[in-house]
Amino acid sequence: MIYTVGEVAKKLGIAPSALRYYDKEGLLPFLKRSSGGIRVFTEQDFSGLAIIHCLKQTGMPIKDIKRFMDMVQEGDGTIEERLELFQKQRENVKKQMEELNKALDVLDYKCWYYECAREKGNTSSVDEMGKAEMPEKYAAIKERMRSLV
């Protein structure tokens, strides 16, 4: 089956302009065109598109994604280099997740803080709470936030 840019974009949940950009940047060496010059995709193209989309979501620069796609075209002689690229990106994602989890903790704390303030009618009563009066998790986050100042 043949798919248009719009159909593929819808299936991947991305903008059609993103696919056109990927093509312009040379990320789609497998891409075929119709006799009228229109980009067309096949079922086999979806695995490559899914990897490109995944790498883009992880924050990998386009130049590195292009290098990966070039390595795929070069063949099995680049397996080691491809593995290293994915291992490095996996570590980058793990670091991003750690930072995002820390940020999520702060957001959870602030939601709890303002829910308490709403119940009490002011923020000063929440500010004056001792560690024993608040959930242990939030006491630790509050302490961590104070240590940054």
Image (spheres, rainbow, N blue to C red):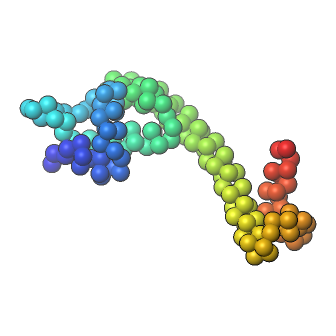
Q: Residue furthest left?
A: 35
Look at 76% across and 65% down and name the residue there: 113
* Residue at 19% in and 46% down: 3
Q: What is the quadrant of the C terminus in the image?
A: top right
Quarter of the image for residue 94 reads top right
- Which of these two is toward me, 134 or 73? 134
Quarter of the image for residue 22 reads: top left
Using residue 135 as the reference point, say whether residue 5 is left or right of it.
Answer: left
User: Does residue 135 lie above or below 53 as drawn?
Assistant: below
**Side of 130 where 65 appears, left or right:** left
Q: Position of residue 16 (x, y in %)?
A: 30, 42
Residue displayed at 79% across by 56% down: 141
Count the numbered circles shown: 0
Q: Position of residue 37 (x, y in %)?
A: 14, 31
Q: Position of residue 11 (x, y in %)?
A: 30, 52
Name the side, left or right, on which 124 lies relative to 4: right
User: Residue 26 at what x, y percent from top left?
Assistant: 32, 26
Residue 48 visible in the snapshot: no
- Judged from this view, the residue extending furthest toward the bottom is 119
Judged left or right of residue 139, residue 109 is left
Q: Is residue 25 visible?
A: yes
Residue furthest to the front:
121
Task: Indicate whether 35 appears above or below 53.
Answer: above
- 58 or 109: nearer the eye? 109
